[in-house]
Image: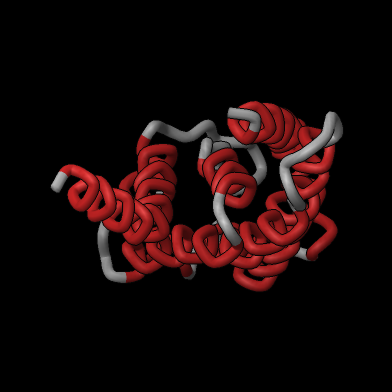
Amino acid sequence: MSNRIAAIARTTAAHAKPVALPVLFSVLMWASAAAGAVPIPGTPVPITLQTFVVMLAGLMLTPAQAAASVCLYLGAGAAGLPVFTGGMATASLVSPSGGFLIGFLPGVVVTALLKGAAKGRLTALRYFAACLAGCVVVVYAFGITMQSVMTGVPFTAVALASAGFIVGDLVKAAVAALAAAGISRL
């Protein structure tokens, strides 16, 4: 009887994990937005820990799970739940910072696709490069473009104003890469 119960528990866990992880990461995205924001002069987009959580999702989940976590998060905000920075909801998606939020989806997928298998000493470096490509380059491309279109400010001016975020995102990418590489060894 105990073998049957153990088999049921393993089966249940195997079915729950693919759903539970995206839900967990979408909740972490909300928590990172709720934790607070640091404004950057010259841009309406604040610094938050959301990109860090998106990086971790891309590094620790499959591409489908990572996409599901961001879709859950964006869907919650689109449905009117106050999950975005400052307790905002739907309006954030069509604000100057909306492109960054929308860019989380392709960014997390690119990161998850580029991370590769967790093996060898260069895992953290590969994870760092995946974060830069997906969660910095892709997210910034969406964010800067949408902010430029919405505000009427030239793309290059928005890009220069957004440069203040790059140092923080490099630090977030390094920490996420090291954390994910360390966890992958467990």
Residue 20 makes an appearance in the image: yes
Residue at the image position 25 percent from the left and 49 percent from the top: 9
Figure colour scheme = secondary structure
99 displayed left or right of 159: left
Q: Where is residue 95 in the image (x, y as percent from the top left)?
A: 50, 64
Q: In which quarter of the image is residue 119?
A: top right
Q: Position of residue 60 (x, y in %)?
A: 58, 45
Determine whether 172 is above or below 126 in the image.
above
Q: Where is residue 10 in the image (x, y as percent from the top left)?
A: 32, 50
Q: In which quarter of the image is residue 122?
A: top right
Q: Which residue lies furthest to the left in this view?
A: 1
Determine whether 152 is above or below 174 in the image.
below
State which quarter of the image contains the C terminus.
top right
Determine whether 179 is above or below 8 in the image.
above
169 displayed left or right of 64: right
Q: Where is residue 85 in the image (x, y as percent from the top left)?
A: 41, 46
Looking at the image, how many numbered discs can be counted on the residues?
0
Residue at the image position 84 percent from the left and 29 percent from the top: 121
Determine whether 61 is above or below 80 in the image.
above
